[in-house]
Amino acid sequence: DHHPIPQLEINEILIDRAKQGKIVVRLKGGDPYVFGRGGEELIACHEAGIEVEVVPGVTSAIAVAASAGIPVTHRGVASGFSVVSGHTELNALPHDRAHTLILLMGVRRLREAAEQLIESGHDSDTPVALVENGFADDQRVTVGTLTTIADRADAVGAQPPAVTINGDVVTLSPAWQPA
């Protein structure tokens, strides 16, 4: 939630440096086209006549879950998954614990999201993992259920960046400790 350089200024910098004849590389964590601004940057460069090569990344929704030992799908446990922004209304998402729900950018809204999922019919005992700083030396995994995860995250002082994984696949993580 802290963006020191606004997106329009980033677009201007990319275009300016490219027009200076420099080779410009824009590195982004995860996939720049999954809740990233990669599409906006591509359009801005194309409109300025700048040739662009996109090298796709792996979205943090899948990569960070894997770093915590959580497959987003697993035979006999989960056959599908949804990736949504933590700022999204969550009422219409599948209610089946065998369908993994991954929330990106949702740490500050974790309590509200968990309550909204329960109110919309999700099982309050659904396993949840909050993975902070995925792949970094200080990666931390906090586990609980939809009922307990917000309190557990508050207790450890959880901060962004983090990915929240909801569903029975969380029980496959080495961090899972049944209540």
Image (cartoon, rainbow, N blue to C red):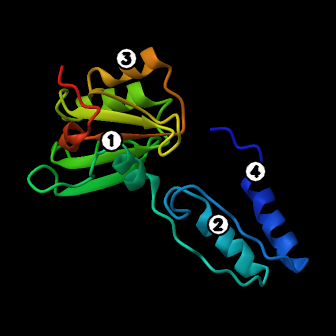
Mark 4 neighbour class, 10 Å CA radius: few under 14, some 14 to 19, many 20 or more: few
- Residue 151's disc number: 3
Is 129 or 146 nearer to us in this picture?
129
Q: Residue furthest front?
A: 137
Image quadrant holding the N terminus, namely top right
Mark 1 neighbour class, 10 Å CA radius: few under 14, some 14 to 19, many 20 or more: many
Q: Residue at x 48, y 46 (%)?
A: 135
Q: Residue at x 61, y 60 (%)?
A: 37
Q: Nearer the viewer, mark 4 or mark 1?
A: 1
Disc 4 secondary structure class: loop
Question: Label 4, label 3: how many angstroms apart (C-alpha)?
Answer: 33 Å
Residue 171 visible, this angle: yes
Instruction: Name the kind of residue labelled 1 in the image.
Output: Ile
State whether residue 29 is above or below residue 165.
Answer: below
- Residue 139 location (% of width, % of height): 47, 36
Q: Nearer the viewer, mark 3 or mark 2?
A: 3
- Residue 42 location (% of width, % of height): 65, 73
User: Is the Cβ of the residue at disc 4 closer than 8 Å to that at disc 1?
Assistant: no
Q: Quadrant of residue 74?
A: bottom left
Left or right of 76? Residue 10 is right
The residue that mark 1 highlights is 165
Say which label, 4 or 3, has the lower sequence index.
Answer: 4
Question: Label 1, label 2: how many angstroms apart (C-alpha)?
Answer: 27 Å
User: Is the Cβ of the residue at disc 4 closer than 8 Å to that at disc 2?
Assistant: no
Say which label, 1 or 2, has the lower sequence index.
Answer: 2
Disc 3 secondary structure class: helix
